[in-house]
Amino acid sequence: MPKTCDVVVLLSGTGSNLQALIDSTRTGDSPARIAAVISNRADAYGLQRASDAGIDTRALDHKAFEGREAFDAALIELIDAFNPKLVVLAGFMRILSAGFVRHYQGRLLNIHPSLLPKYKGLHTHERALEAGDTEHGCSVHFVTEELDGGPLVVQAVIPVELQDSPQSLAQRVHVQEHLIYPMAVRWFAEGRLALGEQGALLDGQLLAASGHLIRN
Ligand code: GAR
């Protein structure tokens, strides 16, 4: 059994991905341990989920800072007090400064509700429907300085149904997010996943550009 891998989770909202991570680290055989959950919004429901699970929480209001760099510097200080091996963005709706991203290079993961590189940014489900896509999904990737652009670790693909609305699509994508994020975090915690020069490595092998692909 590998050593424990302390994880800090950053979020801004509901925290259903956090809940999936909490549930997966409670199974007893995962080396990942969520050391703290930090939000830029004190009223984020994800903080409640964390404290219900007995996990340390912190809120750091970005509006109290003059600019992104100052907020990110304070955030780094808060995160590093927990000495995590991995930082996980789980619906953290802030653009991170280059300095922040560099500080956590190779140990910063994000989940995004689209099949990247398609639909970076917001309103991904609406955009997939408007484009008439027959497939949609979600992606876990290492964070680099390019927004939603870092090397892909895993993607889950779902078919788009004729009657889908943004809401129904979001719901089915969420189910997949809750499967692939714990999987990627576990790989990292087990020492199987790393960021190499050319991209994401799983068990020492370079992953395909799409990451590990799961088709539904
Ligand atoms: C998730 O769908 C996640 O993919 C998305 O925010 C949602 C958070 O849901 N993240 C992004 O759009 C980041 N660009 P949750 O709070 O229920 O986990």
Image (cartoon, rainbow, N blue to C red):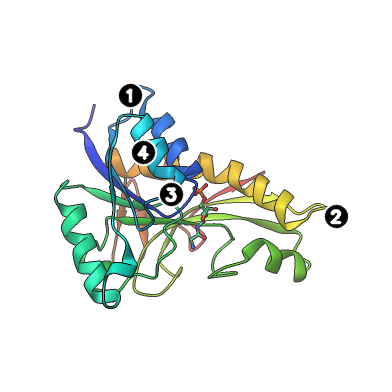
Contact between labelled residues 4 and 3, with CB atoms less than 8 Å apart: no
Evaluate whether residue 204 shows in this view.
no
First in sequence: mark 1 or mark 2? 1
Q: Nearer the viewer, mark 1 or mark 2?
A: 2
SS type, badge 4: helix
Residue 177 makes an appearance in the image: yes
Distance Cα–Cα, label 4 vs label 2: 35 Å
Q: Which of label 3 and label 2 is nearer to you? A: 3
- The residue that disc 2 covers is 162
Tell me the amino acid under the disc marked 1.
Asp
Q: Amino acid at mark 3?
A: Ala
Q: Tell me the mark number nearer the camera, choosing from 1 and 3.
A: 3
Residue 34, given in percent of the width and then of the height, sits at: 29, 38
Q: Mark 1 sits on what residue? A: 29
Q: Secondary structure at mark 1?
A: loop
Q: Which mark is residue 44?
A: 3
Residue placed farthest to the top in the image?
28
Whichever of labels 3 and 2 marks the residue nearer the N terminus, that label is 3
